[in-house]
Amino acid sequence: MPRTTIPSLGLAALIALTVPVAAQEPVAIRVAAEAKEPARESALVSTEWLEKNLDAQRLRIVEVSVEPGQYERGHIPGAQNVAWHSDLVETVTRDIAGPEKFAALLRRLGIDRDTTVVLYGDNNNWFAAWGAWVLAQYGLVDNVKLLDGGRKKWEAEKRPLDTRTPEVAASTFQAAPASPALRARFADVLAVARRERDEQILDIRSPDEFSGKVIAPAGVQELAIRAGHIPGSVNVPWAKAVNPDGTIKSTAELKALYAAAGIDGSKPIITSCRIGERSSHSWFVLSRILGYPVRNYDGSWTEYGNAVGVPVVNLAGTVWGGK
């Protein structure tokens, strides 16, 4: 069967290197694409579209939220709940879910390779984008969408919520090993930091984290020994890609935002944050909407900031939490 063309050419090229053609079959449900922004329309669905298509047979809606209890207090009708910290990862080793665990999850969710999957969550789809990144590594790309605006927009528009857990027929999903093409490792970012590789690192943490003023956001456990950032990286906080209503900014606005930091897709990009979750949101925006070649570094500052003998930039002059 011919392979579906993925609008994000950078992402498609990376996936095609390692994912079998059989894992890239056409999807049954298509969202109408507007000529002005086809990649955006392939990556996102609107709240209006989703409410009209809640009963579509080849559609699965999945919530991946940050705060516990969001799903239980009310979710989009038909949505199923996925916990990023237990369902999408290996709970003993620090890794994404392996093929067996991932396949079992998707079978439970009733997802096959011809299913259209709409992911959404709280905090402007922060962890929903993490889910999209994990799914992409297993070849689920063009049929995986984010709900533009996530829970925030759905609730603000007073669209229906449900507290019942839907019953879905299990799928027969099978998973090959995850593709390494969308994931950066410690050795990759160290090579960039040492100027041994001509790639760009986009650090999407807050300016205070990037400068080294703080190691982690307020109220979040500090998991690194040193504060600062990887040499050569540039800082564009992930939330700058989002409008006040939670929707992702226009293609033109996104291009201008990243171009101001020297990111224009002409070089391979590595996104990084603290543990790789916020950076998956920027990975989604850059790869799925702008079509740039991007890998996400889920080791991020928790791994790099704890490594021995690596170069670090600390603009705030802090060491061990003090001056």
Image (tube, grey):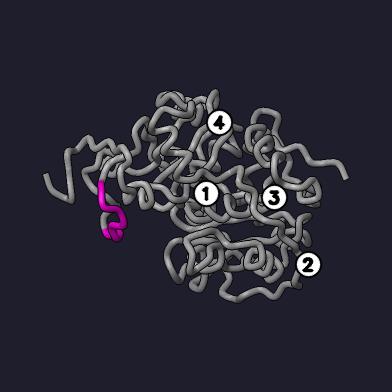
Residue 51, how many percent across, how many down?
Answer: 65, 57
| Magenta residue span | 219-226
Q: Earlier in the sequence, mark 2 or mark 4?
A: 2
Q: Earlier in the sequence, mark 3 or mark 1?
A: 3
Tell me the residue at 73%/41% (across/down): 32
| Residue 154 in view in this figure | no
Q: Residues within 10 Å of mark 1 (few under 14, many from 20)?
A: many
Residue wearing tag 1: 149
Q: Earlier in the sequence, mark 1 or mark 2?
A: 1
Tell me the residue at 41%/53% (across/down): 275
Secondary structure at numbered mark 1? loop
* Residue 251 numbered mark, or none: 4
Q: Nearer the viewer, mark 1 or mark 2?
A: 2
Residue 184, how many percent across, how many down?
Answer: 51, 43
110 lies above or below 226: below
* Residue 172 numbered mark, or none: 2
Quadrant containing the C terminus in the rendered view: top left
Circles 3, 2 touching at the beta carbon (< 8 Å): no
